[in-house]
Image (cartoon, helix red, strand yellow):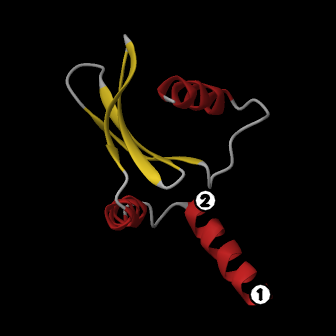
Amino acid sequence: MFFLLAWAMRRGASGSPGLLPHEALEVLGRAPLAGRQQVHLVRLGNKLVLVSVSAAGIEPLSEVTEPDEVQRLVALCRQGQTNSAALMFRQALDRFAAREE
C-alpha cells in the first residue's frame, strides 16, 4: 500500500494523465522537519497516513483510521486553506450539486 501511495504522489506531481480522483487521495498538508525532511498528511479514502519524505525516500509513520479523528484532522487542515481558490471552487460545486439533488 505504501509503495502505491508513493507512486501516486510522484505521478500526481508530474501532471500526467490518469491522476487519482480527489475523493480517493488527497495531500492535506505538510510540515518541515530537520534538514530536507518533511512530513505529509495524506487522506487515502477514509483514513489518514502520515508519511516522512526525505532524499532517502518516503516512509509511513502513522495511520489514523478512527472516523471521528479523521474527520477532525481533515477539518483542521482544510480550515487553514480557506483562501485557496481551488477549495472555494470545490465548495461552490458541492453547493451546486446539493441543489440539484
Q: According to the image, label 1 marks what residue?
A: 101
Instruction: Relative to 96, say whether 74 is above or below.
Output: above
- The image's mark for residue 25 is none
Where in the figure is residue 72, as x and y percent of width and height? 33, 66
Where in the figure is residue 61, as x and y percent of width and height? 29, 32
What amino acid is at disc 1?
Answer: Glu
The one nearer the camera, 97 or 71, is 71
Q: Quadrant of the C terminus?
A: bottom right
- The image's mark for residue 86 is 2
Instruction: Relative to 79, say whether 53 is above or below.
Output: above
Residue lying at the far left in this picture: please name it. Answer: 34
Labels 2 and 1: the sequence-earlier one:
2
What amino acid is at disc 2?
Answer: Ala
Label 2, label 1: how many angstroms apart (C-alpha)? 23 Å
Instruction: Relative to 82, say whether 12 is above or below.
Output: above
Q: Secondary structure at mark 1?
A: loop
Q: Residue at x 79, y 33 (%)?
A: 17
Q: Residue at x 74, y 79 (%)?
A: 97
Q: Secondary structure at mark 2?
A: helix
Identify the image quadrant of residue 91: bottom right
Where in the figure is residue 35, as x and y percent of width and height? 23, 19
